[in-house]
Amino acid sequence: MKTIADFFFKKSPTRHTQKNNNFHTSLHFLTNDKGSPADYSSFADEAYGKNVIVYRAVNLISSSAASVPWKLHHLQNDKKIEIHDHPILDLLHKPNPISAGASFFENLYAYKLISGNCFIYALRKSGGVPLELHLLRPDRVKVIPGNGGMPKYYHYKIGDKELKFPVDKLTGKSDILHIKSFNPLDDYNGLSALSSASFSIDQHNESSKWNLSMLKNAARPSGALVMKSGNYDQDFLTKSQFEDLKDQLNEVYCSSNNTGRPILLQGGLEWQELSLSPKDMDFIEAKHSSARDIALAFGVPPQLLGIPGDSTYNNMQEARLALWEETILPLLDHVIDGLNNWLINMFDENLLLYYDIDQISALALRREKLWSKIENASFLTINEKRKMIGLSPIKEGETLYAK
């Protein structure tokens, strides 16, 4: 049986000579020493495309992260002066003619969550400032290793078209920005959260198939037709009678379309219904358990995904706050560091890109508590308080204290 876990953990000796049309691929191919990214189309379809928990978790994180507005500062001595009009902000708001900023970054975060890698290509003229930014699908990019652990170049292939994007062997600069998750087995490619959650995803998918089979059979377990003649010689149907009865049940009474239709029994046959056993009930709970494991792999509180049986947080507000603090903000920090190290250097090294944390409504309660503590801190100067909440200093602020 083909499973998501097979993609990550089952080795295939023919992976280099035979086209891979399913997710029976080895972990070595996912994290090999030649810098090749995994062809993730099959497992992305099975995990993201066909598993509601993975789909919702990825979309919840990526859409929430993409909704945070950007801020750009000019660094002048020890001061940060916010810039409201700059080509970098224009580029982030409209990366290319067919992508708006929100959809561009939503796709970027989704790629990173699903594959562990995301690639941004900067289109520019003769080493100048970028004119457009484009996302490259991770399965179309191969990282070609160089000396000293640094990539030699990025190989991009789509259809018959192939491109090579070189990497400066001294500075590491390239027209490609590669943002990846930590992978202990690979120097060049990130490790997907789907790898850790692969067995739980398989279990959840099989549970859904089991429930669908139940639904096709009137949404309840099968029953048994029992002969009640009391005569041993007559307690068995002939082969012809057995086949006729089986065809009748399959054609007339099975599937959800025939739910509730009365059954006509002859010759001493009696229908004996079978109810859900404790084992069946445990199987349903196992589906919820696997769903919680999937949510855990992506860092999403189960309450936000509608998964029953979890009471880690007292209310939805606490769960949303945990999602932002433990998952979305670290993801934003990871991406913003990459952009500051790559994109900003193409314009001006004295610029700093950041996200506007004050515009995140889920953090409003935490922000109010912080401001209240700062306001009541009598040992801090006005400027020290303003600095702690991201405001510029004011004249004579170093000598004024709050009452």
Image: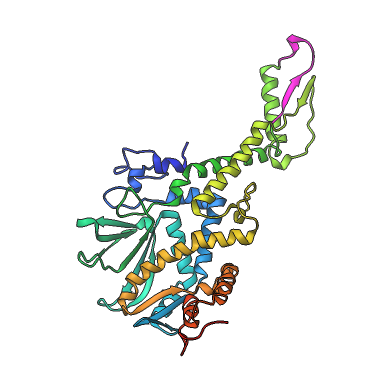
Percent across and percent down for residue 331 are: 45, 62
One can see residue 190 in this view: yes
Frontmost residue, 387 versus 294: 387
The residue nearer to you, when weighing 50 against 395, is: 395
**Quarter of the view holding residue 247:** top right
Q: Is residue 178 left or right of residue 387?
A: left
Horizontal side of residue 102 vs 230, given as left or right: left
Q: Residue furthest bottom?
A: 395
Residue drawn where x is 54% and y is 40% of the image: 203
Above or below for 395 versus 217: below
Is residue 100 within the magenta segment? no
Nearer to me, 150 or 93: 150
Tally of marks: 0
Residue 24 appearing in the image: no
58 to 184, vertically: above or below: below
The percent coordinates of residue 340 (x first, y second) are: 36, 72
Estimate the x, y position of residue 14 in percent, counting from the top left.
Answer: 31, 39
The residue range painted magenta reads: 222-236
Above or below, 208 relative to 250 = below
Please say if 83 is above or below 117: below
**x and y percentages locating residue 166 in the rendered image:** 24, 65
If the image is split into quadrants, where does the C terminus sit?
bottom right
Q: Residue at x 38, y 72 (%)?
A: 133
Instruction: Answer whether residue 226 is magenta in the image.
Output: yes
- Most foreground residue, 137 or 317: 317
Which residue is rendered at x = 43% and y = 66% of the image? 333
Left or right, residue 69 beside residue 184? right
Give the colour scheme shown: rainbow
